Image (cartoon, rainbow, N blue to C red):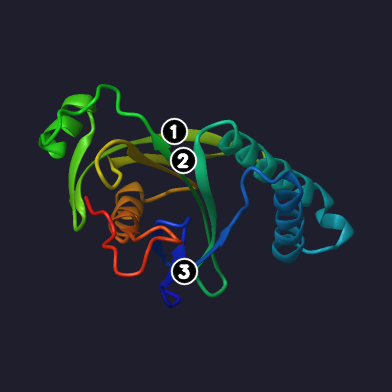
């Protein structure tokens, strides 16, 4: 695997991505279009015979950005490779959400997470409790069907007033359990830090 890389998701969150990932700008159509065009050209190439592949890749990326922009998402990243020359298609979208029901002041957030998402699997991350829901569905790519893993992770943001929701899509996930192990570790690497502009010496909120 390539060297894991610490990446800023926004002013408050960092994550360690395994392999090679690229951030896609959200809520900025021109910046997103430039990034998508450059990414498709670099990954697919310019040959005329690949025109259909470029169009398909571009439309899929544009669809993903549009879905993220229509939600409360604040970060979108795409996986390119898990090892040099070894493609590993996946995406992660992160958003801030309101709790389904407000937690009690000073209450146990792990217990409240379980009440709000009783059908999800409990995870004990290094930074606190989380819930994970995962499904595998068949998706068609270029007229061929392949399994796609969708994993939703939820955990409390600093202060506990809102949730962080991370959705990971992994097309062609032929070994879902192994993929989940990798994604669990990736989510476990998320770290909160003080927002930019916070006065020096002021501790960051934890969870």
Q: Position of residue 171 (x, y in %)?
A: 50, 45
Spatial CA distance of label 1 from label 2 is 6 Å
Determine the residue positioned at 31% across, 61% down. 189
Q: Nearer the viewer, residue 83 or 61?
A: 61
Q: Pointer 2 and pointer 3: residues touching (CB < 8 Å)? A: no
Secondary structure, mark 2, is strand
Q: CA distance from mark 3 to mark 1?
A: 24 Å
* Marked residue nearer the N-terminal end (2 or 3): 3
Instruction: Provide the secondary structure element on which disc 3 rests.
Output: loop
The secondary element bearing badge 1 is classed as strand
- The reply to whether residue 111 is visible in this rendering is yes
Compared across the picture, whether 148 is left or right of 57 comes to left
The residue at which mark 1 appears reads as 137
**Residue 80: where, in percent of width, then height?**
56, 62
Query: Quadrant of the image for the N terminus?
Result: bottom left
Residue 106 is labelled as none
């Amino acid at each position: 695997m390539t060297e894991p890389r610490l990446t800023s998701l926004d002013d408050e969150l960092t994550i360690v991505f395994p392999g090679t990932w690229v951030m896609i700008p959200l809520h900025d159509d021109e910046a997103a279009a430039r990034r998508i065009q450059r990414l498709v050209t670099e990954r697919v190439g310019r040959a005329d015979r690949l025109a259909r592949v470029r169009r398909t890749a571009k439309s899929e990326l544009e669809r993903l950005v549009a879905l993220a922009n229509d939600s409360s998402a604040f970060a979108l990243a795409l996986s390119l490779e898990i090892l040099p020359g070894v493609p590993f298609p996946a995406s992660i979208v992160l958003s801030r959400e309101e709790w389904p029901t407000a937690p009690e002041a000073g209450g146990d957030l792990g217990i409240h997470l379980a009440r709000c998402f009783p059908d999800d699997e409990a995870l004990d991350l290094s930074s606190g409790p989380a819930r994970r829901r995962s499904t595998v569905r068949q998706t068609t790519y270029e007229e061929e069907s392949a399994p796609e893993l969708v994993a939703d992770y939820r955990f409390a943001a600093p202060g506990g007033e809102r949730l962080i929701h991370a959705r990971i899509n992994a097309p062609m996930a032929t070994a879902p359990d192994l993929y989940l192990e990798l994604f669990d570790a990736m989510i476990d690497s998320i770290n909160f830090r003080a927002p930019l502009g916070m006065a020096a010496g002021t501790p960051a909120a934890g969870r």
